[in-house]
Image: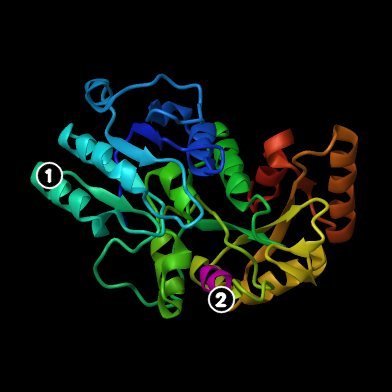
Amino acid sequence: MRTIAKPYLLFLGDAGREFGAKTAQGVLHWTPEDCLAQFRLPGCEIDLGLPDMDFPMAQAARARTVLIGVTNRGGVLPDAWVPPLVQALAAGLDIVAGLHQRLSDVPELAQAAAAHGRALHDVRHWPGGPMPLATGRKRTGRRALMVGTDCGVGKKFTALALQRELDARGVAATFRPTGQTGALIAGHGTALDTIPGDFIAGVAEALSPDNDPDHWDVIEGQATVLHPTFAAVTTGLVHGSQPDALILCHAAGRRTMRGLPDWAVPGLAESLQAHLTCARLTNPAARSVAVSVNTKGLPDAEARAAIDRAAAETNLPTTDPVRYGAAVLADALPGS
């Protein structure tokens, strides 16, 4: 698995409001200590509130990697961004991106990286070498996997909040990212939705290897095994993760599946059972332990009512870990 050097200089280019700064905002939210400064070209309409630095300034301030923090609709690198990124490589900085387009496929960047001995990290793409096939072999250590009723319901945020809670308690725990933004936050990992189907479970096994008996791997989930479009990725992740504990993530008020307006979001109990059945192929002792409800945008009273409904439907400890803290989820882990 690749390792990305930190801290970051967040590259915003000349992005207007139509660009999504989700990647930069997510990394800044969860690891502000890793975000040294921002770099903006003339005309940029996004401001993260960080100091503005050019590449020599950032390198002198000990930045290690330029993180491309905004993404256009096609996930490609605008031509106008290539010359300044070449300058970043010449200044002694690596570059990392979660774009669909590979940085290494841009000739100017590939040549500059080779000339200056710098790294180009494409976290949406396999870093090279043979991909592992899953074995199903029981691994040491303990694993909590975030699963969902749909895409975009808060699995990454739930995993990060839980890992921080365990860390605060002195419990050995590691966040294991499975998507590009999670990999940028952690500084390691692979986006599973870029892996060929036969190898997803094997890569998931590699993401959470053998560990100490009391160590928790807190694994970011992807989509749901009940999503007609993305279930294949989720199924491979569930099998390869060998989870001891499943935490179901749900967006309060979500009625239809992301990108599928004719498909209703399945019930919480149905979702739990589907993921539990899948998990028990490689870990017969897998258990559903808690529910995480994303209540973003709801007033407090409505948020608490949504949490109470989810708890009643599943008979499991339930909270919004971003809004109210992850203590409920940490308490629900076996042996906690």
Q: Residue 211 vs residue 264: left or right? A: left
Instruction: Classify the position of the N terminus by image quarter.
Output: bottom left
Assess disc 2: are there few (<14), some (14-19) or many (≥20) residues with their C-alpha within 10 Å of its C-alpha: some
Name the amino acid, label 1.
Gly
Residue at the image point whose x is 45% and y is 72% from the top:
200
Q: Quadrant of residue 190?
A: bottom left
Q: Which residue is mark 1?
A: 117
Residue at the image point whose x is 43% and y is 67% from the top:
194
Q: Which residue is mark 2?
A: 232
Mark 2–mark 1 Cα distance, whole angstroms, equals 38 Å
The image position of residue 280, as x and y in percent, is 62, 75
The image position of residue 243, as x and y in percent, is 57, 64
Position of residue 55 relative to residue 84, above or below, is above
Q: Quadrant of residue 262?
A: bottom right
Q: Which residues are drawn in magenta?
A: 233-237
Name the amino acid, label 2.
Ala
**Which circle's residue, 2 or 1, is located before the other in the chain?**
1
Q: Which mark is residue 294?
A: none
